[in-house]
Amino acid sequence: MKNILILKSVHKIQGSITLPGSKSISNRVLLLSAIAKGNTKLVNLLNSDDVTYMLKTLQQLGINYKLSNNRTRCLIIGNNGHFKPKKKIKLFLGNAGTVMRPLTALLSLNDKCNVILTGEPRMKERPIKHLVDTLKSGGAKIKYLEKKYFPPINLKGGFQNYFNNNLIIDGSISSQFLTSLLIISPLLHNDTLINVKGNLVSKPYIDLTIKLMKIFGINVHNKNYKQFKIIGKQTYLSPKEYIIEGDASSASYFLAAAAIKGGTVRLNNINKNSIQGDIKYVNILKKMGAIIFYGSNYISCTKNTLKSINMDLNDIPDVAMTLAVVSLFAKGTTTIKNIYNWRVKETDRLVAMYNELKKTGAHVIIGKDFIKITPPKYIKKVIIETYNDHRIAMCFSLLSLSNNSVGIINPECTTKTYPNFFTEFKKISIYN
């Protein structure tokens, strides 16, 4: 029997939230700390399923670390180079793309490894062909174990890049493929040129990777997102301590709630200088009519009349989902464009969002890479199927800001990135 969480109709949103650490930053700095020279103390690490998979995997690959009782502080003992598993090993990575993709690249550097990377059923439906093709072009020995072009895969190293220092990667499906190549490039013998084929999606995540690499002593030359140059034979150097800023994707739900039915909500541990691309969401919400204030280490949002938008949100596909639900409370028809990569996330998000938005009474049209939403006069009382997708569960919690309650099927799926989400959401909810 499916577990359903009923969120009662909320009268008003008011309060303060201290955001947990960013998932995208947490998993990147865990990996960079592991391959760096020196020990790194990470502060405000996210405690979630995806981060747990990364930590467990690092441990299986021989990395030592000390984790605090609340799992938000971690001392990583750096390995000073790529991983060297001594025996055949099978790594289960859940549905964590931020673990699967970079590990595929890093483990391809070790000639003597024999590693199987696998995960949940949905991970076996998430494409990895573009990354594997590029690694194979540099000599990597990678075999698909079930469905061609998808995990699980068997890695036996082989990627050298001694002679061919020009790599080509298709950037049209996932920026994580390019991120993975960027991370391994300083460890290669020669300087590397990475050439991007097609339109690169989610560019802010590449900016994030490059900024974090710089903190660990590595510079990347970015030529208009078409070509990247990285000097070879380098060593990642620990920054000794790194404080992880609050998760901008998670911030979107609370800011949206305030914009729809505030009061004012204040989010601590994030500001307008965030290195995360999803911080752009704040200005989009402001453009829709919300009242935004930036503090030294917080952002607040206050209710105002919301109007529709028509925007290309290719750069920020995760928070584009939040905006899709916010559009139900806005005046006019909202169009969100260039979001084809919704289809290859935790579920086919274009189809899933279409199905669930329609339940509310909204008029919804989808195409290959867009969604158009006209809000209903009254939002119906509905039960939301989450497709085991954490972001669907979180963004549709906003329906409780209508005059009806909402049911969320399988609310536990939020443990992927935000185990305490519903507790925090309730904290700022005022009921009649």
Image (cartoon, grey):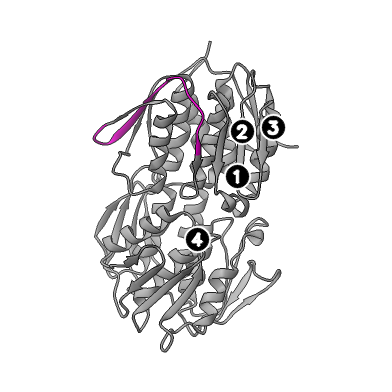
Which is more N-terminal, label 2 or label 3? 3
Q: Which residue is mark 3?
A: 358
In the image as oriented, which residue stretches furthest toward the bottom?
163
Q: Which residue is mark 4?
A: 199
Q: Nearer the viewer, mark 3 or mark 4?
A: 4
Task: Identify which amino acid the numbered label 1 is placed on.
Answer: Phe
Task: Identify which amino acid the numbered label 4 is placed on.
Answer: Asn
Q: Is residue 359 left or right of residue 128?
A: right
Mark 3 and mark 1: span between their CA atoms? Answer: 15 Å
Residue under the image location 42 percent in, 47 percent down: 46
Q: Secondary structure at mark 3?
A: helix
Mark 1 and mark 2: span between their CA atoms? Answer: 10 Å
Q: Is residue 311 left or right of residue 5?
A: left
Q: Secondary structure at mark 2?
A: strand
Q: Which residues are magenta?
A: 295-310
Q: Which residue is mark 2?
A: 373
